[in-house]
Amino acid sequence: MRKAFVRLLVVSVLLTVVSVGLQRICPWSVDGPAAPVWESVHEIYTLKNGIIMFWLDHERFPTDLNEYYRLHPPVSSSDTTDNYGNEYLYRLTEGDPRFIVYSAGPNGLDESGLGDDIPSDGEESQYEFNCPEYYPCPSYCEYTRTAAFGVAILAWAATILYMIYSVLLAAIRIIFPSRD
C-alpha cells in the first residue's frame, strides 16, 4: 500500500514539474487572447448607456458621436476607439432600438453592425466572437499547458483521496483489529 502511495505521489510531483515547465515556456495570459473583443464590448455598452443618458438629459438622441463627445467629453482619446484602433460607429435607426453603437471589428470595415462588427443592438447573444476572426487562436503550447495543468490537478486529487483512504483504513484496523 505504501508503494502505491509513493508511486502516486511521484506521478503527482512529476506532472506538477511538467506543468510548471510548460508555464515557463508558454506563460499564462491573464487577459487571454479574446480580451480586445470583450474590452470593446464593454466600451460599447458604456457608450450606449451614455447615449441613453444624453437622451434623458436632452429628450433626443445625438445626431452623431461628435455631438455626444462635445457634451460628454471622453476621458482620453482612446475612449473613442475600439481595441482594433477604429473609431466607434453610431447611427440612428427606425423602430426599437432607436440607435446602434458598434465597432467595425477586426477588419475595420463598416458593415452596419453586421459581418464581423461588434454591435450594441440588443442582439449580442447571437454573436460568437471566435478565433481567428476576432483574436488569435490559442497555440498548441497553450492547449498542452492547460491539459498538463488539469492532469496535475487530477493527480494531486487522487493522491489526497488515496491518503484519506489509507488513514481511514488504518483507523478501521485499529478500531476493529483482526481476529486471525
Image: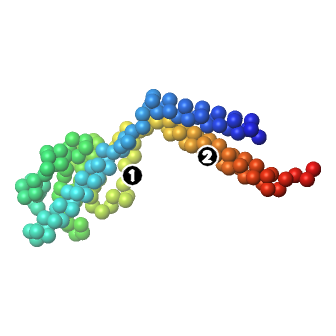
Q: Which residue is mark 2?
A: 157
CB contact under 8 Å: marks 1 and 2: no
Compared with residue 51, is residue 110 higher up or lower down, i.e. above or below? above
Image quarter of residue 30: top left
Q: Amino acid at mark 2?
A: Ala
Rounded to the nearest angstrom, the CA distance separating label 1 from label 2 is 34 Å
Compared with residue 147, is residue 52 higher up or lower down, i.e. above or below? below
Query: Residue 6 appears at what percent x and percent y?
Result: 69, 35
Q: Check the image and tell me how it is coloured.
A: rainbow
Provide the secondary structure element on which disc 2 rests.
Answer: helix
Q: Residues within 10 Å of mark 2 (few under 14, many from 20)?
A: few
Q: Is residue 6 visible?
A: yes
Name the one closer to the observer, 147 or 103.
147
Q: Nearer the viewer, mark 1 or mark 2?
A: 2
Provide the secondary structure element on which disc 1 rests.
Answer: loop
Q: Which residue is mark 1?
A: 128
Q: Between disc 1 and disc 2, whose residue precedes?
A: 1
Q: Is residue 87 visible?
A: no
Name the one closer to the observer, 53 or 30.
30
Query: Residue 74 appears at what percent x and percent y?
Result: 13, 51
Q: Residue at x 36, y 54 (%)?
A: 127
Name the one closer to the observer, 158 or 85.
158
Q: Residue at x 24, y 54 (%)?
A: 44
Q: Amino acid at mark 1?
A: Glu
Compared with residue 107, is residue 127 higher up or lower down, i.e. above or below? below
Q: Is residue 42 left or right of residue 1?
A: left
Compared with residue 61, is residue 29 higher up or lower down, i.e. above or below? above
In the picture, the quarter occupied by the N terminus is top right
